[in-house]
Amino acid sequence: MTQRIDIWVESAGLGHVTRQINLCAHLAMRPGMQNLTPRFLVDDNPATQLVLARSGQEFSVRDPDVSKAFRALHADWSDTAPALFILDSVSHDLEGASGLALRHASVPSVVFIDDPSDRDVSCDLLVNALPTLGNPAEKRRARRAVRGVEYLVLPPEFSAARSASSSKDFSECSTGFAFFGGADLENFSAVFVDAITQRQSGIQWRLLLGPSYAHSDNLAERIAAVGRHVEVVRYVPSMAAQLAGADIVVLAAGNTLSEAAAVGAPAIVLSQNSVQAENAHFFAVRTGVVDCGSLVPDSAERLAQAIGSIAGDAQQRRAMSGDMMKTVDGEGGRRIAGLVDSLVHSER
């Protein structure tokens, strides 16, 4: 067995690969895990590869045929089995080809899913990172399963950002931040700019476009109508600092919403799929985050109204911020790293 962690990441937005990069950072802080080297196994998505390259992580591009890729991985393990296998998956068929890896006799396995139905998977540790207002379903195939906001894996830098946010003054609302994921398939960035055009509130916005955003030409025309109220960027050095420094944020209801909650950034959210809709509903109920739903013809108008309402209500932003930080304590990465450490060093 080698001193290696094999991490299979499926590309469906950048939240999956980002989560595993975050987990690697937490694992590296544990004495028993510092000698293990991550090897990411990814598809040919250039955005995923760019994120990994920026983080300095080693990665290999796997065969596009999933069955062939898992068989090749299993064959590779006959010579150099890793100390741990992690699968961050969007697939609903985790008992087929992936079973070769998940049920390997000598390699402990961890599976991350974002699943409203809270399905069961044969593995050593199952992590459903999607928050829930109810009780997790009973598991029979996973040796251990955890679910809830206390297991959200955020970067270690969010701990320091939380400290700065706890003393924030909400008397003014002058800076805003907007981000809708690595690809922004619904082009919520354009909806956001249209909303700002309809109701300019004096807020200076920074709009982050992900590495796979493909509507820049169309967006440029909209930006011209807003003038200097929106700065468009393609990269921020620290998402924690960016979110913590904003008086208000407009986001897709994916992983970035959880990050915003950790630093108490008052949020308005839009949902690109059913998983994000579930996430948005949870945070709306628990923290008062404003849920503007999925893309509809009047999304820009609804978003403009929400921004105007939240920006003008310091008490609401203050209460929302406090409830968000109570809901997401930023310690999920440490908790999962502890569980993984115990798994790797336990007898199978």
Image: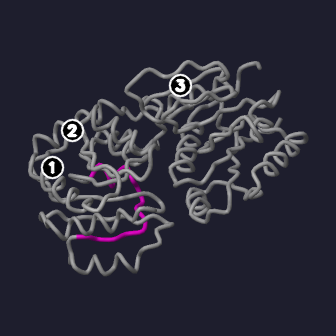
Q: Is residue 9 magenta?
A: no
Q: CA distance from mark 2 to mark 1?
A: 10 Å
- Name the residue type under label 3: Val
Circles 3 and 2, Cβ within 8 Å, touching? The answer is: no
In the rendered view, does 9 fall on the left or right side of 242? Answer: right
Residue 283 placement: quadrant: top left
Q: Earlier in the sequence, mark 1 or mark 3?
A: 3
Q: Which residue is mark 3?
A: 146
Circles 2 and 1: CB distance less than 8 Å? yes
- Name the image quarter holding the N terminus: top right
* Residue nearer the viewer, 49 or 159: 49
Q: State which region is magenta.
A: 230-245
Q: Is residue 258 above or below residue 331?
A: below
| Residue shown at 20% from the left, 66% from the top | 196
Q: Is residue 139 left or right of residue 185?
A: right
| Amino acid type assigned to the residue bearing label 1 in the image | Ile
Residue 34 in the image, given as x and y percentages of width and height: 65, 37
Give the residue drawn at x 13%, y 46%: 170
Tell which of 67 and 170 is nearer to you. 67
Q: Tags 1 and 3 in contact by the CB under 8 Å rule?
A: no
Residue on which disc 2 sits: 320
The outermost residue toward the right is: 79
Which residue is found at the position 81% from the left and 46% from the top?
73
Distance CA(mark 3)–CA(mark 2): 26 Å
| Residue nearer the viewer, 145 or 281 | 281
Assign the C terminus to one quadrant of the image: top right
Would you identify the image quadrant in which residue 56 lies?
bottom right
Q: Amino acid at mark 2?
A: Met
